[in-house]
Image (cartoon, rainbow, N blue to C red):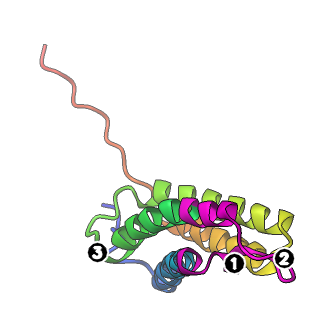
Amino acid sequence: MSRSIATPGRGTRALVIANAAGAALSMAFSVAGLLSPELALPGGTDPATPLTDLYAQAYAARALPLGAALLYQLLLSRTGRGLTPLLLVSGAVQLADAAIGAAAHNPGMTVGGTALAALHFTLAARLPRPTTTSPSPSPA
C-alpha cells in the first residue's frame, strides 16, 4: 500500500511545507503585480504601460488557479492523487518564469522561479509512485 500525501515520509513534510509556502508566495506576487504592475519591470525601466498591465493580468490568470490547486493538493487532499503531475506542471511553469526573468534582467524573478521549480521537482521525485494493479482476468 502506498503512503498518501496526508502521511508523508521522513523529510517529505518539510518539502510539502516549503512547496505550499512557495505556491502561496507565487500567488501573493501575482496579486501584487495586479495592484502594482511596475513591480514586474526591472529597475530603471519606464513606467508601466498597458502591456505591463496585460502581462500582470495574464500572469495572475495562471498563477492564482495553479497555486490554489497546488495548495489544495498539498494541504487539504487526503489522497494526494494528481499531486505529482501538478508539481511537474508547476515546476515547468516556474522554469518558464525564471527564463522570462532572465531575459528581462529581473533577478528576483529568475532566482525565485528557479528556486520554486527546484522545490516542485524535488517533491515530485520524492513522492511514492502509484501502484498499478493488473486487471483481473475475466471469467471465461
Q: Which callout, 3 or 2, points at the residue further toward the start of the chain?
A: 2
Q: Residue 23, how many percent across, how many down?
A: 50, 75
Left or right: 85, with 69 as reference point: right
The residue depicted at 55 percent of the width and 76 percent of the height is 26
> Which element is circle 2 on?
loop
Q: Residue 7 lies in magenta, yes or no? A: no
Relative placement, left or right, of 73 versus 127 is: left
Question: Magenta stretch containing residue 42, yes or no?
Answer: yes
Characterize the local packing of mark 2: few (<14), some (14-19) or many (20 or more) Cα atoms within 10 angstroms. few
Q: Which residue is mark 3?
A: 76
Picture quadrant where residue 91 is located: bottom right
Judge whether 93 appears above or below 114 on screen: above
Residue beneath the point at 22% across and 31% down: 136
Q: Which residues are magenta?
A: 32-58
Please indicate, yes or no, whether residue 21 appears anywhere in the rendered image. Answer: yes
Q: Earlier in the sequence, mark 1 or mark 2?
A: 1
Front residue of this view, candidates 129 and 46: 46
Q: Is residue 87 visible?
A: no
Which label's residue is closer to the chain start, 1 or 3?
1
Callout 3: 10 Å neighbours few (<14), some, many (20+)?
A: few
Apparent side of residue 18 relative to residue 69 in the rendered image (left or right): right
Residue beneath label 1, please? 38
Residue type of the residue flagged with mark 3: Leu
Q: Residue at x 70, y 58 (%)?
A: 96
Q: Position of residue 59 (x, y in %)?
A: 57, 63
Residue 55 x %, y %: 63, 62
Q: Which residue is mark 2?
A: 45
Q: Position of residue 110 (x, y in %)?
A: 77, 73
Q: Are marks 1 and 2 in contact (CB under 8 Å)?
A: yes
Whole-angstrom CA distance, mark 1 to mark 2, is: 9 Å
Find out whether the residues at labels 3 and 2 contact each other: C-beta distance under 8 Å. Answer: no
Nearest the eye: 94 or 33: 33
